[in-house]
Amino acid sequence: MSHPAELTAIPAHAHEHEHDHGGTGVYAKTLIGLLILTAITVAAASFDFGQGNVVIALFVATIKASLVVLFFMHLRWDKPVNAIIAMAGFLFLGVFIMFCLLDFNARNNYLPSNLHPVPDMPLAPGTAPAGEVLHTNPAAAAEGGEKK
Amino acid sequence: MSTTSVDLQTHGHPAAHAGEHAHDPHHQHHFTTMEQQFDTSKIGMWLFLATEVLLFGGLFVGFGMMQARYPREFVEAHTHLVRWQGALNTVVLLISSFTMVLAVQAAKKSEKGKQVLFLGLTILCACIFLVVKYFEYSHKYEEGWLPGRFYSYKGDSIPACHAAPPGEAAAAAPAANAAPCTNGYATFFSFYFMMTGLHGFHILAGIAVLTWILFRAKRGEFSASYYTPVDLVGLYWHLVDLIWIYLFPLYYLIQ
Amino acid sequence: MDQGIATSPHIGDRPRPKKNYLNETKGFWSWAATLDHKRIGIMYLVGVLTSFLMGGIFALLVRLTLLTPSHKLFGKVLLTAEQYNRVFTLHGAIMVFLFIIPAIPASLGNFVLPLMLGAKDVAFPRLNLFSFYLWLTGAIMAIAAMVFGAVDTGWTFYTPYSTTTDGPVTLMTAAVFVLGFSSIFTGLNFIATVHKLRAPGMGWFDLPLFIWGIYATAIIQVLATPVLGITLVLLMLERSFGIGIFDPRIGGDPVLFQHFFWFYSHPAVYIMILPGMAIISELIPTFSQKTIFGYRAIAYSSVSLALVSFIVWGHHMFVAGQSQLATVVFSALTFLVAIPSGVKMFNWMLTMHKGNIKLDTPMLYAISFLTMFAIGGLTGIFLGTLATDVHLTDTYFVVAHFHYVMVGSTVTAFIGGLHYWWPKMTGRMYSEAWGRVGCALWNIGFNMTFLTQFFLGSKGMPRRYYNYLDQFQPLHAFSTVGSWILGLGLFITAAYLLASLRKPMDAPDNPWNGTTLEWKTSSPPIMHNFEEQPVLEREPYDYRPVLVAK
C-alpha cells in the first residue's frame, strides 16, 4: 500500500522519531513506581483482609505488569497491532481460568430444575444390600433422614 | 496482464532507490524496506510472547484450581517460603528490566559503550536472581519440601499422604481406620518447583541469548539503523520479569 | 465478443520460464536447507500425505477387526483387545497431530499464501524451515513410540488412565509437544506475513478468502496450542513425579485434565475446518466464474469462528463430571458457534446460483464438501444439545459426526485444493477422467463408511469398543466394506496424481481463469515468485473479462 516513492526513503536514522517520548527519565520513573508498588504489596501481605488479600495482591501485580508492558515494553508508543496481540494473550488466558473456576465452584451444586423427588426403586426380591445404602437422590435421602 | 508493476532489480529494490544508500547487510530480500522488516520482527516477537503468556498461564490456572481445592494446605505450605528472598528477587528483576531498556535505548542511539554496560548489568542481575534461587531450592531440598511423591517433610499439621507408585493401586489401598492425610502440601510444592523451575529455565535461556547479544554489541553490530535483536531480546526479558511479577505475590504473599 | 478484445486466459501468457522453483537449484541440500516457502510446502505435503497413508492403514485395520464380532479374518484373530486399543489410538493420534492439523496450512498454505499476497516469501523463512523440522522430529518421535509398543489411551490421553498405564506415554506426549510447536510457529509466521507482506494496493478487504481462513486458523494456532503444550508437560510430570494435579488417587482432578486438554482441542478442530472452508471459498467462485456472495460476511465469519471456538470446549465433557452449570453454559455457547458456519454455507450456495458452473474435479470436491459439511455440522448441533447428547455421547454417533467434519469436509476440501493448485505446483495437469472416478469413489466409500455409523451410534454402539453385540454386525460390516471403497478411491487419486508427474510440464499459468495473484505467475512459479512486484488493481473475485488488445 505504500507508493514506490516512499519505498526509497530509508535515512540512516529512520527510527529517530521513536525517541521523542522521554527516554531515560520515563524509564527511571517507571522503575521507581514499580519498586514502590512492590513495597506496597509486601506491606499489604502483613495485614489480613481475608479473601481480599488475593484480590489486592493481583490488583497491584496487574498495575505493575501494566507499567512494564506500557513503558518498558514500549506499547505506549508502538503500533496498535502489538497491543492487540498482547491483549489477546491475556484475554484468552482469562477466558480459560474463568470457565474452569465457574465449573469448579459449581460442582455438586445441583441445578434447581433437577431436584424433583424420585421415589426409590423397590429392590428385586433377595437382593437386599449388605452394607449402607447409597441414595442417588439427595432430596429423598434428606426426607428419609439418612446420611448420604 | 493488466497489473502495473514496480520495476525491481534482482534483489528487490526499486530502481530509483539503488543509488541512495549501501545495501544494509541485515536487510532480508523478501522485505521491501528495513522499517517493514523491523515492524514485522516486532509483530513476530509479540506473537511469541502471547504464546508464552498462555503457556505459563496454563500453570497459573492449574495453581489456581489446586489452591481452590486445598486452601488450608496451600496457606500453610507457603509459610515455608522466605518472603525477603522472593522480594529481593522481585527487586533484582525489576532493576534488570530497567537496565535492559537502557541497553535498547543505547543501541538506538548507536552508543556502543553504554550498550555493553547495560547488557552486562542485566546479565548480572539475572545471575543474582539465580543465586538467590539456588539458596531457596537447596533449603527446600534439605527440609524435604519437594514435589509430588518426593515430598518428605514431616512437620505439617495434617500428615501428607504417600501414594503407591502407578500400577500398585490395589495393594496400597489405605486401611479402613487410617488417619486422614492430604496431598495438598505435595501439590503446592509440585507447582512451586514447576513454575519457578520453568521461569528459572527462561532466565537461563535469557542469560544465554543476552550474552550472545552482548558479544555482538561489543563488535559494534547494533546502531540506529539496525538494533532489532536488542529490542526483541529486551521484549523477551520483560516478559520473564512480568511472569515473576505475578508469581511473587501468589506464592510468597498469600494469606 | 468484439474483434480486438480477447477474453481467453491463455492470450498474453508469457513464454514458460526455463528455471522454476523446482529445477533452479538441485541436490539434497538445496531442498533440506531451503528457505523457499514453495519447497517447504512441498516437503510438508509429502510428509503429511505419508502420515495420512499411515493413519489410513490403521483405520482400515480397525474396520477390518470390527467386520465380525469374533474379530477373525480367514480364521485368525486379527487384533487382540489390547492391540486394538493401541491401533485406534495410533489412528487418532497420527491423523490428528501428524496429518490434519498441519495438512492444509503447512502444505497448501505455505505454497499459496505468499503467492496470493504478491509476496516473495513468508515473513520468517528460517522459522518456516525450523517449523518443518519440528514437524519431522515430532513425527519420528511418534513413530518411535509406535515401535516401543504404542499407547492405548485413545488420542485424548484422558487421566488417570494415561498417568498410570504402561507403555511409551511420555514419548508419545513429547512427540505431540514438539508437533505443537511446529504448529505454533507456522501460525506465527502466517499472521506476521498477512499483516506486513501484502502487495501494494492490497488492503485487508482485498485479500482472497483463502487468506482470511488461513489467518483465522493461525490465530487459533498461536493462542490455543501453548495450552496443549503445558497440558502435556503436566501429564508427563504427573506420570513421573506424581505432582498430584490430574490423578485422583494422589489428590488430583481428572476433569481438570479434560478442561486443559479441550481448551486446546476444541479450537484445534477449527484449525482443521477453517482451512478447508478457506479452500472452498476459492473453489466455488472460480468454478462458478462469479464473484463470491457476501465477501465481508465470510471474512468476518472466519475470524469470529476462530474466536468463539475458544469458549465452547466443555461440550466434550457433558457427562465427564463437569458441574451442571458449566454444562448448560457450554451447551448454549455451542449453538452460537454454529452461526458463522451456517453463514458460509449460504454464501457459498448463493455464489453458485446463476453462476457459470464448471464441474471440473476441484468443483466436484467442493460440492461434495457442501453436502458432507451440512451433515457433519448439523450432527454437531445434535451433540451440543444436552438432552440428546446424554444418549449419543461416546457412541458411534460422535465418531460419525467428527469424521464427517474432519474427513468429509476438511479432507475433501484438501483434495479439492490439491487438484486446484496441482498445475500451479507441478506445472502439469492430471487426468480429468480419472479425477471424476476418484471423486465418485470417495463419495460412495465415505458415505457408506460413516453414514452407517450414525445409525450404529443412535442404536447404542459405543465408540472405541472392541466387542459388540451381534445385532450390530450388519451395520459394522457395511461400514467396513465402505472403508475399502474409500481406500480404493484414495489409491486411484494418488495414482493418477503421481502419474501426471511423468508428463511434460505444459500446464498453463491460469487453467481455471482464477482471479487471485498466484495465477498471474507461471506454473510452476519461479524461485522468487514474481518477475515484477505485482500491484493489486482489481477487487477480489472480479471475473469480468480482462480486455486485452490483440
Image (cartoon, coloured by chain):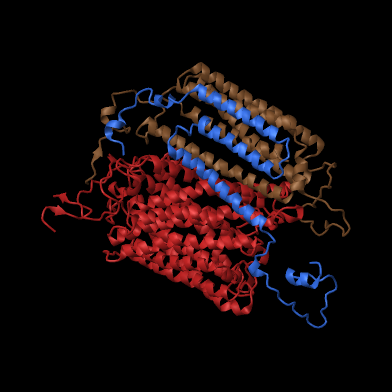
Chain colours: A blue, B brown, C red
Task: Pick the residue in front: C15 or A62.
Answer: A62
Residue C524 in picture, x, y percent from top left: 33, 48
Q: Which residue lies furthest to the bottom in this view?
A: A125
- Residue at (54, 62) in percent of width and height: C332
Can residue C276 be spotted in the picture? Answer: yes
Residue C268 in picture, x, y percent from top left: 52, 54
- Residue at (56, 32) in percent of width and height: B238
Task: Pick the residue in front: C205 or A36.
Answer: A36
Using the image, determine if residue C497 lies above or below residue B125.
below
Using the image, determine if residue C493 lies above or below residue C547.
below
Give left or right: position of C428 versus B228. left
Give left or right: position of A54 versus C520. right
Q: Residue furthest right?
A: B177
Using the image, determine if residue A50 lies above or below residue B83.
below
Q: How many marks?
A: 0
Residue A104 in picture, x, y percent from top left: 66, 55
